[in-house]
Amino acid sequence: MKPERGLVKFLRFLGILFMSLAAAFTILGGIGTSCAALFPTKWESMAPLASYQ
């Protein structure tokens, strides 16, 4: 096996890992935004947003 093949596999793994993390953070951020927009009175820190609802 050439050393380049190992490097390519490692870089592919890193790419997949970082893309997975980016997707997970995007989904979690969307869930948090939806909760803050739809139910601001459930949490004390979001209560000031209720007047904008």
Image (spheres, rainbow, N blue to C red):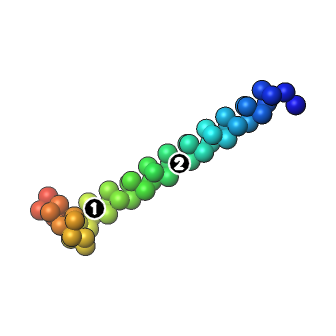
**SS state under label 2:** helix
Residue 2 located left or right of residue 35: right
| Quarter occupied by the N terminus | top right
Above or below, 23 relative to 7: below
Image quadrant of residue 48? Answer: bottom left
The amino acid marked with disc number 2 is Leu
In front here: 11 or 22? 11
Q: Can you tell which mark lies on residue 36?
A: 1
Which residue lies most toward the bottom here?
42
Mark 2 and mark 1: span between their CA atoms? Answer: 22 Å
**SS state under label 1:** helix
Residue mark closest to the camera, 2 vs 1: 2
- The mark that comes first in sequence, 2 or 1, is 2
The reply to whether residue 13 is in sight is: yes
Above or below, 6 relative to 33: above
Q: Crowding at label 2, few (<14), some or many (≥20) Cα neighbours within 10 Å?
A: few
In front here: 44 or 29? 44
Q: Can you tell which mark lies on residue 21?
A: 2
The amino acid marked with disc number 1 is Ala
Above or below, 48 relative to 25: below
Which residue is found at the position 39% from the left and 59% from the top?
Answer: 31
| Quarter occupied by the C terminus | bottom left
Which residue is found at the position 53% from the left and 48% from the top?
Answer: 21
